[in-house]
Amino acid sequence: MPLMLIFQHGHTLTFAIINRRPRQREGDRDVLEKVTLIKDIDVVKPHRAHLDILAELALDALYQKYEFSNFLELHQAWQQTLDTAELNRRFFKEIADWYFWTVELVPSALFDEDEIGGLLTSLDPQESSYYKAILQNLFFATLNQEMNTPEKPNNRKFRGEGRQHYNITSLYRYKCYFRDPDAALRLFASIPFLNGGLFECLDKPAPDDGKTILRVDGFSDREDNPLHVPNELFFSEPQVVNLNAVYDTKNSRYTVQGLIHILNRYKFTIAENTPIEEEVALDPELLGQVFENLLAAYNPETGTTARKQTGSFYTPREIVNYMVDESLIAYLQNAVSSRAIHCPSETKLRHLLAYNDEPHQFTDTEVGHLIAAIDTLKILDPACGSGAFPMGILHKLVFLLGKLDPRNSQWRQRQIDRVQGAITASEKIDDSTFRESAINELEGEIASINEAFERNELDYGRKLYLIENCIYGVDIQPIATQIAKLRFFISLIVEQKIDDARENRGVRPLPNLETKFVAANTLLDVEKPAQLLLRNPEVDRKEKALEEVRRRHFTARTPRTKDRYRQRDADLRSEISALLQADGFPSETTEKIAAWDPYDQNAAADFFDPEWMFGITDGFDVVIGNPPYVRQEKIKALKPTLKKHYTCYTGAADLYVYFYERGLQLLSPNGIHTFICSNSWLDVNYGAPLQKYVLDNTVGAVICHSEAEREFESADINTIVSILQNGTPDADSRARFLTFKTFIGDPNLENRRERTRTYTELAQAGTRDNK
């Protein structure tokens, strides 16, 4: 039977509805399943969204809709009413209508190349941004500028007149827009500095002359740089508009209203939901869902479908959780066994990953090895979109560390040991001035590590150093990586403790994630010499220096400090480029390496190389994701290049086939490759080369399919989850095919074989030559 609990704290109430079922092996014990929460209902001044939710839960309203006759049916009515997926769909529908209405209001001249061709670097609608003066000052001159202090009382101020402070985008603009400029400054004064790169203005000097400013955000109060975003887009009352052409409908009525009014109708939380705990509110994951669905609406291959269906282009949280669990179990078994101890049992690892409050089942020695394996993990999503898989990995690793190391004693020490190693290396620097500076800076990092753990919630230090050292993402859309970074920023903010008595209100500035999530074409690598017998050791030294520069930039705070590291980054890239060209690298390759600027948030590189972009030379331990669904008819321009670089190439193969091969190429020895994608490659002719490639280059392949329901709402996609391990198969290697009786992502199913209808094994070595 389900439970409903009501908690009171001060003048707030929280409702909790807990599902439970009998334990399969112990009938006298129950298993607690998903907990649904309506949190922090203010009984004095309730939020509009809470009033709406409670009204929907009223017995009269429920009975009119569901006509229940017993408690179980009432519980089912509760579940459907509190379904956050339905809440997300409703919110997305309103945002989508608002977005398409807004697009219609933008003057057509703004899309005329003759009018704007000289102003923008790209006319792609997905890269266009509009900023109101208040929002620009909030982002660029508040969140990206340190707060005023007694020592520096004018950190936050308006720019001077004329060309004074020209293009210094961390100062306030639009002074004349405010009735009382001093009141505006006071309004912004209490907002803490967040840093993080995400809030930097993207306007920048043109690279050719350095004088002309390329306007992307348009943060300028000059009369010849006008910016016009109608107030009605934010504050309009509800009105009926015609969106039939957009949605391919006839005679339908669509009601839109200002964005602020839409946002006020919903309750938001900054804590992301998990598969077993959901608050009835909109969490940061929705940022990804809105982005990916609106992006799909304007992609030619998905446009019409995306507009008719909402919520169907985003990997469900439960599927992400399942894939993350399977990847981590395989990785941890390999990583721990390589440390000369026995392989941890799958049963114990599954118990460790399960969302429960039971203690783990490992010895102290095993715990040390597991934490070490987590600390050295390198994981990549090669088509990260808005960050569903990287965020899923982060949540699960934080959960594991909380079980294995509740007080962070081992985790903190490993971060200190990493910096101590850098100090030891710095002591060998010949230049005494530079050596002393480097050591002082590194000693400051140790103090910063201790502060991160001591002055914030326990999960803050776990998240921060997992993000810094373990998690990477690539996407060809710059805005996708921006959304992913925003979600990671929010995940850190939620773990910080506000203290008005401390500097910056106790808020630790966010890290810079430009070298953790990059905009690039994953499928194309740079060309390298076929044979390079002797590598110039100076290249390795420069690469180490570049890695150190990017590590320090991760925590840089002031614009001056970041600019210094970015300039040093550019210098090192040029020096490495020259050395590689002398070693026989093609000039096109060396030019790309020198030109790629990780801090240019406007651009996407036309190649991806983990060595130059992430400093990863030995491959990733886990490659996980949902590769793009793009049919072969839409990639005609890419086919000559794909044919040149991919063993799996056939003219009829869809784009995801090449992501499979690329993902396997990017793995470390014994690395784990986990994808969810179309199942077409298993039963069509163009899939034969990929099947052979998988059989030849992996061991213990597992292919999972659910007969219960599709993983995505879109009705025309049949998907499978594949879990592959990099390696050469032998006579004992088996590929396994699992057909699940229920939803693959069900978090409460306890045993893999009990979950399956069929469990088929195929000897890999005996079928490798099959066509």
Image: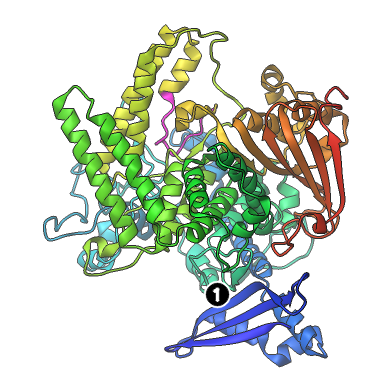
Residue 72 lies in quadrant? bottom right
Picture coordinates of residue 764 (x, y %)?
A: 81, 30
Whether residue 110 is visible to the viewer of this picture, yes or no, is no
Residue 576 appears in the figure: yes
In the drawing, does residue 472 fall left or right of residue 514? right
Q: Quadrant of the N terminus?
A: bottom right
Q: Secondary structure at mark 1?
A: loop
Q: How is the image coloured?
A: rainbow
Seen from the viewer's position, the closer of residues 212 and 364 is: 364
The amino acid sitting under disc 1 is Arg
Q: Residue at x 85, y 22 (%)?
A: 769
Q: Which sits in the foreground, 500 or 256?
A: 500
* Pointer 1 residue: 265
Asked if residue 486 is positioned above or below residue 505 in the image, the reply reads above
Picture quarter with the C terminus:
top right
Residue at the left extreme of this rendering:
151
Tell me the crowding category of disc 1: few under 14, some 14 to 19, or many 20 or more residues within 10 angstroms, Cα based.
Answer: some
Dominant secondary-structure state across the stretch colored magenta: loop
Image coords of residue 411 (percent x, y): 41, 51
- Left or right: residue 736 versus residue 126 is right
Q: Position of residue 705 (x, y in %)?
A: 81, 49
**Residue 490 as seen in the image, left or right of residue 655:** left
Q: Residue at x 71, y 55 (%)?
A: 312
Highlighted range, magenta: 595-606
